[in-house]
Amino acid sequence: MSASNDGALRAAPHGAGRAFIATLSRGLTLAFRRRGEALNPLVFYALVITLFPIGISPDPKLLAVIAPGLLWVAALLAALLSLDTLFRGDFEDGSLAQLMLAPQPLWTQTLAKVCVHWLITGLPLSLSAPLLATLLALPAGSYAVLTLSLLLGSAILSLVGAIGAALTVGLARGGVLTSLLILPLYIPVLVFGTGAVEAAIAGQSALPYLAILGALLALSLMLAPWAIAASLRISLNG
């Protein structure tokens, strides 16, 4: 191997790392400038949880029964709400095509965009869940499990949801199609996330459920960035 090729191979990881940081920084800067749009999922989440006791019943016993499922379903729908914008802005201004032509691996930059989505959507939803859970009379002993399960689960939702968003980025109204494509993949996350909270309420160990969520997250981190990059190439070149 020539010295120039050897130097290029050594420099590639550093270039990919710099591209990841630059894309992450750019995404967070744009999100800060569009604070109203970034807050939409959190506002939606809070409204759903706040209105449910009014629309169903203020009975604490009934609310405590439905609270785990309701908190998770509302978080899932709130994450879906912002998926259509994940790549849409970059597609419309042409920067997505530039990313595909860049020398750095496309998957590293798509992973940075997913991280931005989780930081402005999944993280706020997870941290606000215990506060909103008080409105549903959720036992205080399950708050830590609720937060941890949402932290793990929302990261999976962002990674898997980005695949659907990448496949439909070139469509005029791809939001509904994105939901139809990825909702079946969200069901295991919903089942194990809700199960973890219900186990904590019942006084049982939530570790098996959290371990499965952790395994799903690890699998998503290994496979989803490549799938997102391939989906973007299909959408833009197909």
Image (spheres, helix red, strand yellow):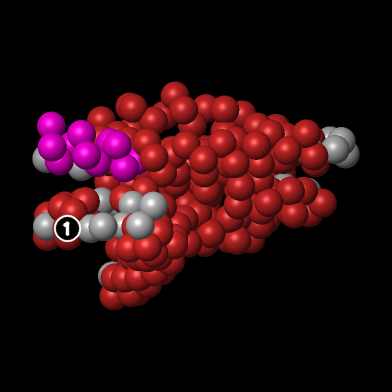
Query: Percent x, y for residue 117?
Result: 40, 56
148 relative to 30 in the view: left or right: right
In the image, 152: left or right of 37?
Answer: right
Q: Would you say the magenta stretch is mainly helix, strand or loop?
A: helix
**Quadrant of the image occupied by residue 53:** top right
Q: What is the span of residues highlighted in magenta in the rendered image?
A: 228-238
SS at badge 1: helix
Identify which amino acid the numbered label 1 is placed on.
Gln
Q: Is residue 224 visible?
A: yes
On the question of residue 176 being in view, the answer is no
> Closest to the observer: 29 or 55?
29
Q: Compared with residue 161, is residue 4 higher up or lower down, i.e. above or below?
A: below
Q: Position of residue 191 (x, y in %)?
A: 61, 29
Where is residue 211 drawn, in percent x and y? 73, 38
Residue at image coords 60%, 61% = 127
What residue is shown at x 37% (from left), y 36% (from top)?
227
For this orientation, the residue located farthest to the right is 203
40 or 121: which is nearer to us? 121
The C terminus lies in which quarter of the figure? top left
Question: Residue at left 24%, top 41%?
Answer: 232
Residue 130's x, y, as percent?
66, 57
